[in-house]
Image: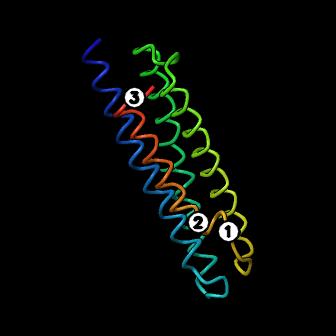
Amino acid sequence: MADYYTWIKAVHLISMVVVVGGMLLNGFLFRNVAPTSPDAARTYAAALAFNRYFVGSALALVWIAGLTLMWLLGAHKDGWFITKFVIVFILSGIHGAQTGRLAKLSRSPGETPSGLMVNSGPITLVLVALAICLVAIKPF
C-alpha cells in the first residue's frame, strides 16, 4: 500500500498545482482584461479552452486521488478532513463559475465580470491556504 499511497499523493499534489494555477490565472484575467479590449474575446476563449482541457482534467484527478487517499487513510471521520472537504467543494464551485463566466465573456466580451470573479484569485489563495493548513496541522 505504501507504494500506491505515495504515487496517489503525488498525482493529487501535481493536479492540485495545475488547478490552483489555472484558477489564479482566471482571477488575473477577470481583474485585468479590459472588457472593451479588442483582444478580450480571444483572450477569454483561449483561457476557456485551457480551463476545459487542462484545469478541468486536473480537477477530476484531484477529486479522484483525494477521495482515494481519504479512503486509504480512513480520514472521512476526522473533523479536519470534513472541513477541508467543504473548502475543496467551494473551490470546485468557484472553478465552475469561472469556467462559465469565461464562456460567457468569450461570446460577449463587453460585459464586466462580477465582483466574485474579479476577486476569485485572492479568494482561491485564502481557501487553498486554509485547506493546506488543515492537512498539515490536523487541528481537530
Looking at the image, residue 53 lies above or below residue 7? below
Judging by the rendered image, the residue that carries numbered circle 2 is: 119
Residue 34 - label: none
Q: Are marks 3 and 1 in contact (CB under 8 Å)?
A: no
Q: Are marks 2 and 1 in contact (CB under 8 Å)?
A: yes
Judging by the rendered image, the residue that carries numbered circle 1 is: 115
Horizontally, is 33 left or right of 1 in the view?
Answer: right
The residue under the point 67% across, 70% down is 106
Looking at the image, residue 127 lies above or below residue 35? above
Q: Are marks 3 and 2 in contact (CB under 8 Å)?
A: no
Q: Position of residue 139 (x, y in %)?
A: 41, 29
Type of the residue with mark 1:
Gly
* Disc 2 packing (10 Å; few <14; some 14–19; many ≥20): some
Q: Earlier in the sequence, mark 3 or mark 2?
A: 2
- How much space separates mark 2 and mark 1, taking CA atoms? 6 Å
The residue under the point 47% across, 15% down is 71
Q: Earlier in the sequence, mark 3 or mark 1?
A: 1
Looking at the image, residue 70 lies above or below residue 16? above
Q: Quadrant of the C terminus?
A: top left
Q: Quadrant of the N terminus?
A: top left
Judging by the rendered image, the residue that carries numbered circle 3 is: 138
Dot in front, 3 or 1 = 3
The residue under the point 42% across, 48% down is 129
Type of the residue with mark 2:
Asn
Q: Please tell me which residue lies in front, 120 or 80.
A: 80
- How much space separates mark 3 and mark 2, taking CA atoms? 28 Å
Type of the residue with mark 3:
Lys
Circle 1 sits in a helix, a strand or a loop, which is it? helix
Looking at the image, residue 36 lies above or below residue 133? below
Dot in front, 3 or 2 = 3
Circle 3 sits in a helix, a strand or a loop, which is it? loop
